[in-house]
């Protein structure tokens, strides 16, 4: 399993109501996208320009925010962020949203993704006098917008100009004193959608956040599009940065693992795409068995799809302790190794004496899979057949997820049989690479970590930040 990137949320209430508590609930719904730090920044559009109130902290949303903190965050426009550190280390200073004061006022910015040219851009800015306070890409983006704002009529024009400089994956929400702006990189790596509740407009990484706050889905922000939300003009759209549809490159791992199954990404149900992955696994890697189980939570939908297609009963083989957070809240090998057992326990009654097909979304280094296979055997499973609802990871990711360098990937330079032996399963099958576009019903995708073919040339130096593997 790999770590997620970030989740972003923004709202503008045209009736002037306070938005901080709505952002809080939106971020709770996006918590699966990042659990290391979170933050909210709000502003009062009828108050003095440039007064932004913000609060950021390490930890989960419900740990970082209390009712008292939320009450103090008064404002009718705001952005929020949940973060997992993909680039830049995990510290309080690096938490977002980033708030930047400059001549024309104040910007608050929340970013999901990774830039591939951030180091060059940082140098360029430093030569012209910029002093950075964080090590995150988002500050580079904010500086460029602020700089371009000086030569632009509007803040959205400055965002467009900044987009010409930055390269890589970004879904951005920017709060200016009187406007809320959403922007998605031309490839559309990371999702971003628009919702509406009464007289408020919402921008969010995933549609599950709209459902949670009772907003209706309006549409996705298109790859390359900039949307500007203001009471005077509603939603305005600038598509001058859009590229031909055939070049779009949505991260296919959003469908396989990152996004919540109740979300829709670019019109495709994440749940359905996982069911399809399970079905294709059953077609391509059949095996005689008594029970199909998923490794909770992300393996469950694919396991259901496998069961539907194969006719083998679907069941539950694990009890998950949901109170300890996700497996990799804290980086570090020691934590990861022990947390598998803390989080999961096998259901002896369900698996004893049975031939079990166990479905997981991915295998990165193999250490987690090895432990889970062993757990099932110790609980009495007669056979354990592992099926994986993605192809083998063979390449790193430069676009906002922490798939590590090749030599750390179990599939690198190994055959499926060799991997099967290492994890101790009776058989092993992966989703075929050619099935990837089928599980998203033909949408254009990035599958660089499986194929090595990236939509943008990867940088020469590894810019993927300070991962702690
Ligand atoms: S390389 Fe893999 S994880 Fe990274 S954006 Fe592409 S599909 Fe997603």
Image (cartoon, rainbow, N blue to C red):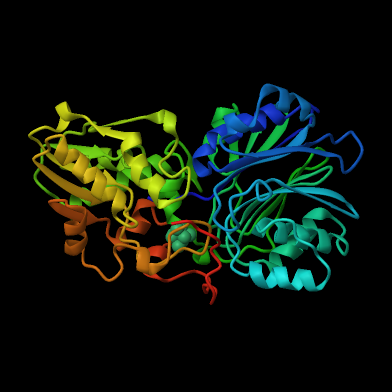
Q: Is residue 282 above or below residue 418?
A: above
Residue 328: image location, x then y, percent: 43, 45
The image quadrant where one finds ligand 1 is bottom left
Q: Taking the image as drawn, is residue 81 in sight?
A: yes
Rendering quarter of residue 391: bottom left
Q: Is residue 318 left or right of residue 350?
A: right
Name the one closer to the observer, 167 or 386: 386
Residue 51: image location, x then y, percent: 86, 40
Q: What residue appears at the point 20 percent right and 49 percent down from the top-left corner?
A: 386
Residue 136: image location, x then y, percent: 65, 57
Q: Is residue 457 left or right of residue 176?
A: left
Q: Is residue 122 above or below residue 357?
A: below
Name the one closer to the observer, 424 or 224: 424
Q: What residue appears at the point 20 percent right and 58 percent down from the top-left corner?
A: 422
- Residue closest to the far front: 334
Q: Quadrant of the C terminus?
A: bottom left
């Amino acid at each position: 399993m790999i770590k997620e990137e970030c989740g972003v949320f923004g709202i503008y209430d045209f009736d002037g109501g306070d938005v901080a508590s709505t952002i809080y609930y939106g971020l709770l719904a996006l918590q699966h996208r990042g659990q290391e730090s979170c933050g909210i920044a709000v502003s009062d559009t009828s108050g003095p320009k440039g007064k932004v109130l913000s609060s950021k902290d390490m930890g989960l949303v419900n740990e970082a925010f209390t009712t008292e903190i939320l009450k103090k965050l008064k404002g009718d426009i705001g952005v929020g962020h949940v973060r997992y550190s993909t680039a830049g280390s995990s510290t309080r200073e690096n938490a977002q949203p980033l708030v930047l004061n400059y001549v024309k006022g104040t910007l608050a910015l929340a970013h999901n993704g990774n830039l591939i040219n951030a180091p060059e851009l940082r140098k360029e800015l430093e030569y012209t006098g910029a002093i950075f306070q964080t090590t995150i890409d988002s500050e580079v983006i904010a500086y460029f917008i602020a700089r371009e704002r000086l030569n632009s009529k509007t803040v959205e024009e400055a965002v467009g100009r900044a987009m010409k400089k930055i390269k890589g994956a970004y879904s951005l929400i920017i709060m200016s004193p009187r406007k809320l702006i959403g922007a998605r990189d031309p490839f559309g790596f990371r999702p971003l959608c628009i919702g509406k509740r009464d007289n408020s407009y919402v921008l969010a990484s995933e549609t599950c956040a709209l459902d949670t706050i009772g907003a209706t889905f309006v549409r996705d922000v298109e790859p390359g599009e900039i949307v500007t939300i203001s009471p005077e003009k509603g939603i305005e759209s600038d598509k001058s940065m859009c590229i031909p549809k055939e070049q779009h490159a949505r991260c296919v791992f959003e469908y396989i693992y990152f996004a919540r199954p109740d979300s829709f990404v670019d019109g495709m149900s994440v749940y359905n795409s996982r069911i399809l992955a399970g079905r294709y696994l059953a077609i391509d890697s059949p095996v005689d068995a008594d029970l199909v189980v998923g490794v909770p939570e992300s393996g469950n939908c694919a396991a259901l799809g496998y069961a539907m297609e194969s006719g083998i009963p679907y069941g539950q083989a694990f009890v998950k302790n949901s109170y300890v957070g996700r497996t990799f809240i804290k980086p570090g090998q020691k934590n990861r190794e022990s947390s598998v057992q803390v989080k999961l326990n096998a259901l002896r009654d369900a698996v004893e004496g049975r031939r079990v097909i166990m479905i997981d979304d991915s295998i990165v280094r193999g250490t987690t899979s090895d432990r889970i296979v062993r757990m099932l055997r110790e609980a009495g499973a007669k056979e354990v057949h592992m099926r994986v609802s993605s192809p083998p990871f063979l390449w790193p990711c430069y676009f906002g997820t922490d798939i590590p360098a090749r030599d750390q990937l179990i599939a690198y330079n190994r055959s499926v049989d060799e991997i099967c032996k290492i994890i101790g399963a009776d058989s092993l099958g992966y989703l075929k690479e050619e099935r990837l576009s089928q599980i998203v019903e033909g949408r254009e995708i990035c599958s660089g970590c499986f194929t090595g073919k990236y939509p943008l040339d990867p940088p020469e130096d590894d810019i993927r930040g300070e991962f702690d593997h």
